[in-house]
């Protein structure tokens, strides 16, 4: 076992800011709907707008970071070990069975997490953001004739936004629970704070990167030359 840096600095900042904004949007959203009273209706509307725009900005930065660092490859779907992972979460971890998938710097997510987070990124977040922007600027867009959205009533936009918001809350609850399924109840949270996680020797499990491939090719060439002499 050794300490391996799994999460980069921006990744950790983005994660915690996103979590804080989602929780704040949840609180102000419930108050806008009249379910709770915290800041007052008018203040909640204002706070909800500001937090929503901040989430849009954070999402844009996160997309840029994922594309420029190749971290988007972490979310390429795979069905390898998917059944084993489902069985582990359903039964195995309660029996103390070993985790079916080894985490590494090159593969942070197991197959089930990949599908879940991919759905979060390409379905839930876009629905919440797009419907929120349409709801926020519905009248402005119509008055200025920038975009024709007359086919989408304000009520339907609000319905989509509310549905997306509840999906976001459900994801948050499941995500918080799943953080407790690591080696200890707090190990995953600690890793997202420090960036480091105690893992088996990374070299035993990591996917070979470009440097590894070049090294292997060089070794093969040397072996071939040695054998031909």
Image: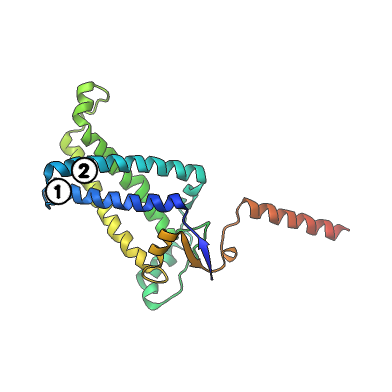
| Dots 1, 2 in contact, CB < 8 A | yes
What residue does disc 1 label? Answer: 39
Q: What is the quadrant of residue 32 in the picture? A: top left
Where 199 falls versus 153 (above or below)? Answer: below
- Residue 118 visible somewhere in the drawing: no
Q: Residue at x 21, y 31 (%)?
A: 138
Q: Residue at x 39, y 73 (%)?
A: 93
Label 1 CA crowd tier, 10 Å (few <14, some 14–19, many 20+): some
Residue 43 in the image: above or below residue 174 = above
Residue 217, which numbered label? none
Q: Quadrant of residue 58?
A: top left
Q: Residue at x 44, y 49 (%)?
A: 10
Task: Kindly tell me whether residue 163 is visible in this rendering.
Answer: yes
- Expressed as whole percent of the image width and height from the top left, the position of residue 152 reads 21, 33
The secondary element bearing badge 1 is classed as loop
Helix, strand or loop for disc 2:
helix
Is 91 on the left-hand or right-hand side of 128? right
Q: What's the residue at 22%, 31% (across, down)?
A: 137
Residue 21: image x %, image y %?
29, 49
Mark found first going from the N terminus, 1 or 2: 1
Residue bearing mark 2: 47
Distance between the alpha carbons at the discs numbered 1 and 2: 9 Å
Q: Residue 74: x, y in percent?
A: 47, 52
Left or right of 21? Residue 203 is right
Return the x and y of residue 229 as percentages of the image width and height.
Answer: 89, 58
Q: State whether residue 127 is above or below residue 188.
A: above
Front residue of 201/147: it is 201
Judge by depth and name the residue closer to the eye, 41 or 113: 41
């Amino acid at each position: 076992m050794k300490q391996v840096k799994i999460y980069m600095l921006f990744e950790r900042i983005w994660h915690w800011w996103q979590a804080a904004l989602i929780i704040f949007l949840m609180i102000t959203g419930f108050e806008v709907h009249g379910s709770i009273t915290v800041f007052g209706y008018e203040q909640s509307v204002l706070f909800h707008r500001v937090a929503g725009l901040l989430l849009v900005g954070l999402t844009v930065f996160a997309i840029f970071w994922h594309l420029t660092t190749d971290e988007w490859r972490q979310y390429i779907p795979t069905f390898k070990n998917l059944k084993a992972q489902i069985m582990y979460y359903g039964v195995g971890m309660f029996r103390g069975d070993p985790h079916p998938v080894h985490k590494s710097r090159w593969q942070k997510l197991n197959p089930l997490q990949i599908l879940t987070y991919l759905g979060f990124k390409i379905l839930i977040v876009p629905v919440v953001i797009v419907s929120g922007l349409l709801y926020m600027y519905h009248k402005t867009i119509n008055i200025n004739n920038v975009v024709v959205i007359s086919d989408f009533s304000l009520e339907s936009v609000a319905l989509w936004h509310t549905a997306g918001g509840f999906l976001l809350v459900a994801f948050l609850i499941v995500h918080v629970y799943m953080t407790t399924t690591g080696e200890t109840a707090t190990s995953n949270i600690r890793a997202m704070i420090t960036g480091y996680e105690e893992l088996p020797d990374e070299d035993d499990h990591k996917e070979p990167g470009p440097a590894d491939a070049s090294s292997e090719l060089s070794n093969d060439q040397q072996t071939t030359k040695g054998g031909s002499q």
